[in-house]
Image (spheres, helix red, strand yellow):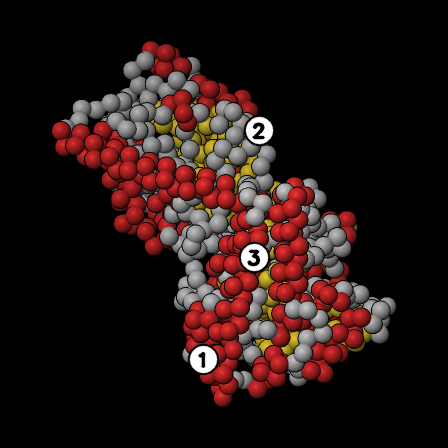
Amino acid sequence: MADVHDLNGKSPSSSGDVDQSAQLRQLIRAYDMNHGLTESYWNQTQSLRSSRFYPLLLIVIRVAKILKRRRDARQATRRAQTAAVPSAASSASAPSSSTPPSVRRLLGDIKGALVVALRGHRAADPRHIPATTPYGEWFEMYNTPLPHIQGVIDRRLGLLRSTPTISVVMALYNSDEAYLTAALDSLVAQTYPHFTVIMVDDGSPTDVGRRIAADYAARDERFTLVQREVNGGISAATNDAIAAATGGWIAFMDHDDVLVTNALALMAMAIDHHPAWQIIYSDEDLANEHGALSVPYFKSDFDPLLLLGQNYMAHLVLARRDLVSELGGLRSDYDGAQDWDFVLRATETVGRQGVGHVPFILYHWRSHPQSTRQNADAKPYASSAGHRAVVDALARRGVAARVEPVGVVGWQHVHFELPAPSPRVSIIVPTRDGSLLPTCINSVLERTAYENFEIVIIDNGSTSPETADYLASLPERVRVIRDDSPFNYSALHNRAVPSCQGEILVLLNDDTEVINPDWLREMVSLVMQPGVGIVGAKLLYPTHAIQHAGVVLGFAGVADHVGKLAPADSPGYFGRIALPCEYSAVTAACLAIRTSVWHEVGGLDESFQVAWNDIDLCLRVRAQGWAVAYSPDAQLFHYESLTRGNDFDPVRFGRYTSEVERMRQRWFATMMNDPYYNPNLSVSTGLYELAHPPRVSLAFHGLE
């Protein structure tokens, strides 16, 4: 965002301002005390967790919870026997061929806890991630419904206007007995009864998977086994399952993964509440060989730019059967990334309004040595298939771009090509005797490979002879506009824009310095993509720590920068710093915007004199249907701390707090529901940390 300091120096303050500042300082001291108490509590908690006996204590609590749930479940079953769904009841009562996954997981946790108690934490099996990890505890607390919460979910299912049948399609090949049994058990345990399961054995050389699948098909009429004589690959097998499906929706599931018990129920609610949605995805995490959970991926709502960089939709994905049929199902040429190719084609077809996101962990993706999640070499063809899927998607859309593989994780980095001729860019730099202005301007002139630009310096009343001499020495492509009005960041830009000649405007602080020559090319090529209105840059502190890689709304009451103080080469939360993606806002310390979009929204709001004007601009641009994007390839230093004024000066502090209040009044609902920041992530303790509690719940999932 534009710096919270102004360029106007100190101003006289009234006694009222001083009184207000004193009250605000007292409020800050109260917050500091509260933070100290929170930190003390956290330290005590960490001390408890470091105890050898902490895992055993949690297991005792878990066993007590399990016993209470079973007792409550038996009582609820007796009360509701007459209302039970026959097929679900018969399925649930069928004996399982193995120990339930929850029991196996508990036994594994008990073993790990005993090892820790006897030999210390370092002696624990590194492959075994017990449920006593912070995420395991979090999932147990917020995603395992107590009986009264489950009752709410069940009642909500009874109120659905429609009960869509969901056909789960699953390809089998050399299936592991334990993993396949766990997967099918998780389907039997679904609280939503209106589903079918089509399992296709893809010519497996062993009969383990066929035998298990046939057993479930014999016991539950909702399960069907189809056998292929010849191995055709995962796409061919899945397409056979789709052809045999009868439900209106197709759910894609791997043969070694697990669904949570309310997965299909929450998807059915989403289908009922959002009839325009044609493809829906959920959040996911990993389950290791022992079933222990880790690495939750709390995703953003639909982000087509991020989807070009990674298949973040992945699991669990549901699509309307007629859409799947229209697209011809999966394509064998992309085996290994067939799901990525499918969602790229599907989202192209239905557009933004047809894509939905259910912000809950509904899918446990199995991580084991034979899986790509734990071993990229297990399917070496997957990365190349993903690369081809992205290249082909861009070609279908008529978008000229270069696609570059990223590391070994299968990500793809898209570099868009410039249109011909390249658009003219006006770089606007406000200053008042800025000590770093020469560094900024010289770096733009000397290091920028993009040629078609002009620089417009807004001289807001500079008095230094050194500044005057420097401005007089600049070449013709640099114009200076003198504006001696009182400092108002928004008004200065609004008055300068009419004289700018560029098709693209770049707002640039005078305390920045260009790092890479392609910075402007990358920003312009991205902002010229259809539907994109604004693009932000990756800004670094002089120490090479990240200062800005996008903006998250709601954090600390208004907003905060993504990646702050992370290493420059950090990929961020699941690649959100390393890959181009969308955000709700970016900082105007370096921001590119189409001139037509600037005029469409009326420029900057001059009531935001110093702070939040850029966030407000981004939100107004998004309200008009334009996307706000981030480019990791436009990199500049931002010497914010060297030019920042005293934020606790009474006048500045009072103005800042009034602008905060104005932002909250205008955008409160938006700030509390940032579509690019999952409601299971914190807006108080730290970006991309677990929220306690989440801003969604199983009882009221917020999808309405």
Query: Which label lies toward us, 3 or 1?
Result: 3
Residue 272 visible at all: no
Q: Nearer the viewer, residue 10 or 100?
A: 100
Q: CA distance from mark 3 to mark 1?
A: 35 Å
Label 3 amino acid?
A: Ile
Q: Is residue 519 above or below residue 104?
A: above
Q: Which residue is mark 2?
A: 517
Marks 2/3 in contact by CB < 8 Å: the verdict is: no
Residue 37 visible at all: yes
Give the farthest residue toward the front. Answer: 118
Query: Which label lies toward us, 1 or 2?
Result: 1
Marks 3/1 in contact by CB < 8 Å: the verdict is: no
Q: Which residue is mark 1?
A: 158
Total marks placed: 3
On residue 596, which mark appears?
A: none
Label whose residue precedes the other's in the sequence (2 or 3): 3
Q: Nearer the viewer, residue 348 or 310?
A: 310
Question: Callout 1 environment at 10 Å: few (<14), some (14 to 19), or many (20+)?
Answer: few
| Element on which disc 2 rests | loop
* Residue plotted at (29% across, 41% down): 660
Question: Callout 3 environment at 10 Å: few (<14), some (14 to 19), or many (20+)?
Answer: some
Label 1 amino acid?
A: Gly
Q: Quadrant of residue 338?
A: bottom right
Label 2 amino acid?
A: Pro
| Element on which disc 1 rests | helix
Label whose residue precedes the other's in the sequence (1 or 2): 1
Q: Which residue is mark 3?
A: 59
